[in-house]
Image: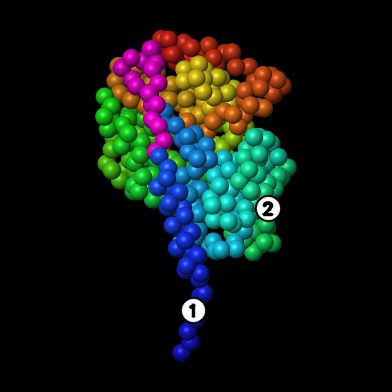
Amino acid sequence: MTDKTICVNRDWVQEAVRRIEADFNRSADTHLLRVEVPGTPDISLYLKDESTHLTGSLKHRLARSLFLYGICNGWIGPKTTVIEASSGSTAVSEAYFARLLKLPFIAVMPKTTSPEKIAQIEFYDGKCHLVDDPKSIYEVSNRLAQETGGHFMDQFTYAERATDWRGNNNIAQSLFDQMEAEEYPVPDWIVCGAGTGGTSATIGRYIRYCQLDSRLCVVDPENSVFFDAYVTGDKTLTGDEGSRIEGIGRPRVEPSFQPEVIDRMIQVEDAASYAAIHFLEKLIGRKCGGSTGTNLIGAFKLMAEMKAAGQAGSVVSLICDPGDRYLHTYYNEEWLSGNGFDLKPHLDRLEHFYRDGGWDD
């Protein structure tokens, strides 16, 4: 008879989980903003402001879940170097939790990642490993994990399973709880983008689990294969370029992307996403990241369709991260014009929708 005991530092595991849970207990929920749209008086728009998390983005929830998942599975220990493939926001949040646990952290990112995000990762004592080819981030992350004896967090694989989609204050449960006292408490549509696919998987599953009538629309930017994969059912599709909307859109179909729980997808031009965040700033007085603009285009389009059909109800989407991370790009006129983006036609369409509720593709 043979016996083998795997030595796990249980005291460290318990302390690590306690620190993460204590950090959660010190945190308030994110706000749900109601945005007035004169052109659709019978259709209410709400934006759940995930930029108010401690690390400034929707990815704070994911990072917490990924760390708990890695710790409780025995993949992360007291001396583990944590490595992530990320275009920025997930890495910012993971760097925060790594510092909380006194663990080294390395973010593998495309060289095009905004300098503001790089600075935030370094603020939390993380290191940034920049690569020329965005598609190489997975290979490089795996290699660094082997070289350091560390753990590749791999958000693109584990995002859909690390979060408890049945509840436990996930983003879906929080959203529906905050809608309870509204005129139309069960949204007709919830709109979000897909980077890992974890948020859409959580929301889509929660809707079904709670037997709700809401539908889920995922918006997808240029240079992403998610939309085509959804339409064709081909999960082997790949693209040659990376998304210019940081945080969403991928050149391959990520394992966490679950098209079966999505009711509809909408493709959005990058210029439209950039125009939308400039337009939104006039409505709420704050700058938001590009993925929020992508969300807003999808939400406005759905609201216009509802109005044309004579429907009343509500639409909910997300503010994913703050715009101060993109001052050198999305909010820089030289960058926009230098990359060939003309926002005026899209701003005109947004103004028309806001005033009259119409939407012309």
Is residue 265 something one can see in this rendering? no
Magenta-highlighted residues: 29-46
Label 2 neighbourhood size at 10 Å, few (<14), some (14-19), many (20+)? some
In the rendered image, residue 256, in percent from the top left (x then y), is placed at 49, 48
Disc 1 and disc 2 in contact, CB within 8 angstroms: no
- Is residue 108 found left or right of 32 in the rendered image? right
- Amino acid type of the residue that numbered disc 2 sits on in the rendered structure: Val
The secondary structure type at the circle numbered 1 is loop
Residue at x-position 38% and y-position 30%: 32
Residue 260 located left or right of residue 209: right
Where does the image place residue 266, in percent across and percent down from the top left?
A: 47, 29
- Sequence-wise, the earlier of marks 1 and 2 is 1
Whether residue 37 appears in magenta in the rendering, the answer is yes
Provide the residue designation for mark 1: 5
Residue 306 or 274: which is nearer the viewer? 274
Horizontal side, residue 118 vs residue 162: left or right:
right
- Left or right side of 357 for 345: right
Single out the mark in the foreground, 1 or 2: 1
- The magenta stretch spans residue 17: no
Q: How far apart are marks 1 and 2 (CA)?
A: 33 Å
- Residue drawn at 50 percent across, 19 percent down: 285
Whether residue 64 is visible to the viewer of this picture, yes or no, is: yes
Q: Which residue is drawn at 49% across and 52% down?
A: 66
Which amino acid type is marked by label 1? Thr
Give the residue number, with chain letter if any, for mark 2.
140
**Tag 2, which secondary structure?**
helix
